[in-house]
């Protein structure tokens, strides 16, 4: 190990740090994609049906008010 020059040691250090950075970035992007898919599923399974229920409730309220006024 004493035969390796300082230049080579620094090059190996920078290369290994760069490799760790790339691995960490790739892992973060992969996890972010998974979280995005989870949130999309949550939105489609919860928020969209709630909007539909709100529209049905509003229509029902409108029909009830109209039927009261027609009597």
Image: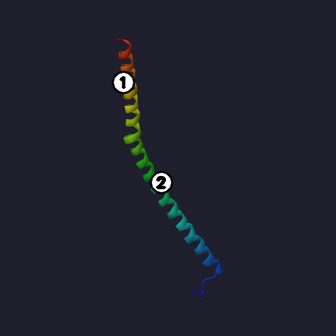
Task: Kindly state the secondary structure of the residue where label 2 is placed.
Answer: helix
| Residue indicated by mark 1 | 60
Residue visible at 37% across and 36% down in the picture: 49
Image position, residue 6 (x, y; %): 65, 80
Q: Are marks 2 and 1 in contact (CB under 8 Å)?
A: no
Q: Nearer the viewer, mark 2 or mark 1?
A: 1
Task: Kindly state the secondary structure of the residue where label 1 is placed.
Answer: helix
Image position, residue 65 (x, y; %): 39, 19
Q: Quadrant of the N terminus?
A: bottom right
| Residue indicated by mark 2 | 32
- Tell which residue pokes out farthest to the bottom in this image: 2
Rendered position, 2 above or below 10: below
- Tell which residue pokes out farthest to the top in this image: 70
Crowd rating for badge 1 (residues with CA inside 10 Å; few <14, some 14–19, many 20+): few
Rendered position, 27 above or below 15: above
Image position, residue 15 (x, y; %): 57, 70
- Tell which residue pokes out farthest to the right in this image: 7
Image position, residue 3 (x, y; %): 60, 87
Rendered position, 34 above or below 62: below
| Residue 21 in the figure: left or right of residue 68 | right
Residue visible at 40% across and 45% down in the picture: 42
Q: Quadrant of the C terminus?
A: top left
Q: First in sequence: mark 2 or mark 1?
A: 2
3D distance between C-alphas at marks 2 and 1: 41 Å
């Amino acid at each position: 190990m004493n035969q390796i020059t300082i230049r080579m040691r620094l090059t190996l250090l920078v290369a290994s740090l760069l490799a760790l950075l790339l691995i960490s970035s790739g892992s973060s992007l992969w996890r972010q994609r998974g979280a995005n898919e989870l949130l999309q599923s949550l939105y489609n399974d919860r928020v969209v049906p709630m909007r539909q229920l709100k529209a049905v409730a509003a229509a029902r309220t409108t029909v009830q008010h109209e039927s009261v006024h027609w009597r």
